[in-house]
Image: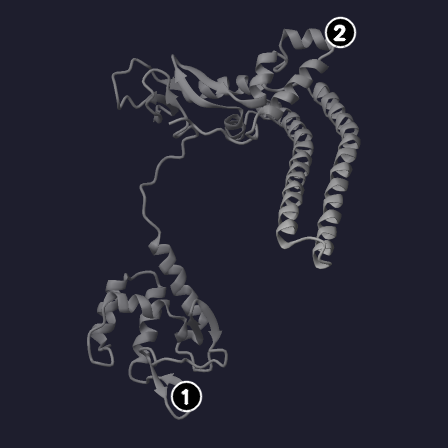
Amino acid sequence: MKEGIWPRNAPLGYLNDKVNKVIIPDLERSPYIVKAFEAYATGKYTLRQIREIVTELGFRSQKEQVLSISNIHDILRNPIFCGLLRYGGEIYEGKHKPIITKKLFDSVAEVMSRKSKPKSKVLKDYLYRGFFHCGECSCFITTETQKGHNYLRCTKRKNPCNQKYVREEIITSQIEKEIKKVSLPPDWISWMIDENKKDQSSETQSSEIFSQKTKDEISLLDSKIEKLMNLYLENGLSIEEYRNSKNVLVNKKQLLKEKLLAFEKKSHNRFELTEKFLKASINNMELANERIPEEILREFKKVGSNFLIKDRTLLFEPCGAWKTLLDSEFGGGNSLVSALRADPDLSVSLDFENLRRRGDSNSRDPFEPATFPR
């Protein structure tokens, strides 16, 4: 194969040259192969139609049998006809003469790929398709267009439901308001990001001390393990004593390594998640002001879960750090925020610290899209 020689019997369209140990085009059958490739590349014919065409022209197997549709399919997928050898999942350059060009082979492959894709009914690209459930009966909320406007309504497939339709733009407006509620004023965010960096710098020094201490303990255990080995080699310990002592040290070392890894990961992750959350809050406010529904919906999916519509009103469950922000009433430029901003002596540092700690205790990334409960 590396030398470009086909190691088996020649495929249909070629013949074995036993003298030169290569395959050569079958002058009788190769024209039918070319015809099959050229016809299929147009995209106008199915495999069944290609089979009928070449069969009518006189194409037969070496045993003079009519080819099946699967035979035609295999021929059109075989790169050997454009000068390449595929063997064991690997492609080699062949020494034999191609029957078709590589360009024609690629065109056929593209047509085959396109035709093999499952055909599905084309659905209208509604913004909230499959996103909401009904707050009364839990069925999906569907969207339909009436008189130039999109309306959301319950599918009512399970039980009788009294919910009425609601205009799509009304729900979009409600989402914008909810997004603003989990958005902090820009000057607050700038201050919080600065404070977060200060805390990170301060904790980095403490972390380095802890990390170095743990690394020193690991290094000490390595020394003890090496000494054990030397004692054993000098007949100072029996094989049993050596193994038992070494196992204890190795177990201690592994625990320290895991402890160090977990500490470093948590130490860096805490501040990164806090900054990510704060920057996301800026982005949410900008999106709400720009009123781009697709972008707003994408960010809204990160804020909570269990998205419902009931009595023409949006309902959802905020999650993670977003819930903490909503509970704190600091988001959205409400009266509490305005009062705090007007009085510099009022501090939000405790609430900022609570927000950050809440994010630490949440094992799931607060910015990971929530999954809808089934």
Residue type at numbered disc 1: Lys
The label shown at residue 343 is: 2
Which of the 4 image quarters holds residue 125? top left
Residue type, numbered disc 2: Asp
99 to 345, vertically: above or below: below
Occupied quadrant, residue 368: top right
Q: In the rendering, at what x and y percent does residue 193 appear?
A: 72, 25
In the rendered image of this protein, does residue 356 appear above or below residue 37? above
Residue 342 image-quadrant placement: top right
Q: Is the residue marked by circle 2 packed among few (<14), some (14-19), or many (20+) residues within 10 Å? A: few
95 to the left or right of 31: right
Q: Nearer the viewer, residue 137 or 146?
A: 137
Residue under numbered circle 1? 21
What is the distance, in whole Å, between disc 2 and disc 1 at their CAs? Answer: 92 Å
Query: Helix, strand or loop at disc 1?
Result: loop
Rendered location of residue 373, percent (x, y): 41, 26
Secondary structure under the numbered disc 2 in the rendered image: loop
Q: Position of residue 155 (x, y in %)?
A: 30, 23
- Marks 2 and 1, the one that precedes in the sequence: 1
**How many residues crowd mark 1 within 10 Å: few (<14), some (14–19), many (20+)?**
few
The C terminus - image quarter = top left
Residue ID at (42%, 91%): 20
Residue 83 in the image, given as x and y percentages of width and height: 44, 76
Asked whether, in this view, residue 113 is left or right of residue 216, the answer is left
Q: Is residue 97 above or below residue 89?
A: below
